[in-house]
Image (cartoon, helix red, strand yellow):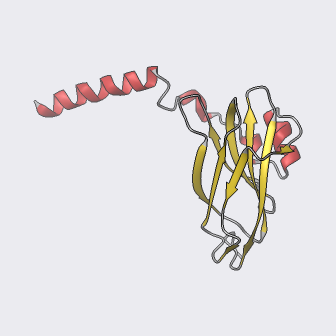
Amino acid sequence: MIRREFLQHSSRVAALMAAGGLLPLGAQAAWQSNAFEAKSMTELMKALGGSAPVESKEVTLTGPDIAENGAVVPVGVATTAAGVKRVMLLVEKNPSVLAAMFDVSDAVDANFSTRVKMGQSSNVYAVAMTGDGKVLFAQKEVKVTLGGCGG
């Protein structure tokens, strides 16, 4: 009896979350693979329909100056820019430049932390894209002593 009630309540909660856009939809399975296949920031902006990137103080990037292990490099991105709809982390010398992409809504604070894999020392970019296609970025060089992409 308790299990049946639990399942009924779970399905109601899941339905409400899906209706509110809080659960991923099956249609989102066709994510933008062309963005993750980009080899440079220029190719990435073209794939996402963004304008030419402009360096901005409204975007901040945190990360170590030297990463001992390139397999797990902690980085963070935050922005105070208005109208931001997407935040990305890029690693310039990785086989795929796009390391992470976060969609932002008005209900979400544009402040993310994660770990990225870096094969070698490289520039890391924090990129914020607004709803009208304006692209702002910050960059930082991260030196890697032990590569994380098979090196």
Going by the image, does 151 lie left or right of 7?
A: right
Quadrant of the snapshot with the N terminus = top left
The residue nearer to you, when weighing 40 against 59, is 59
Residue 143 image position (x, y, % from top left)? 75, 73
Residue 95 visible, this angle: no
The residue nearer to you, when weighing 14 against 128, is 128
Residue 62 image position (x, y, % from top left)? 66, 59
Quadrant in the rendering for residue 148: bottom right
The residue nearer to you, when weighing 35 against 20, is 20
Going by the image, does 124 lie left or right of 8?
A: right
Residue 45 visible, this angle: yes
The residue nearer to you, when weighing 91 against 80, is 80
Quadrant in the rendering for residue 119: bottom right
Query: Residue visible at 80% across and 45% down?
Result: 56
Residue 77 image position (x, y, % from top left)? 65, 50
142 is higher (above) or lower (below) than 54: below
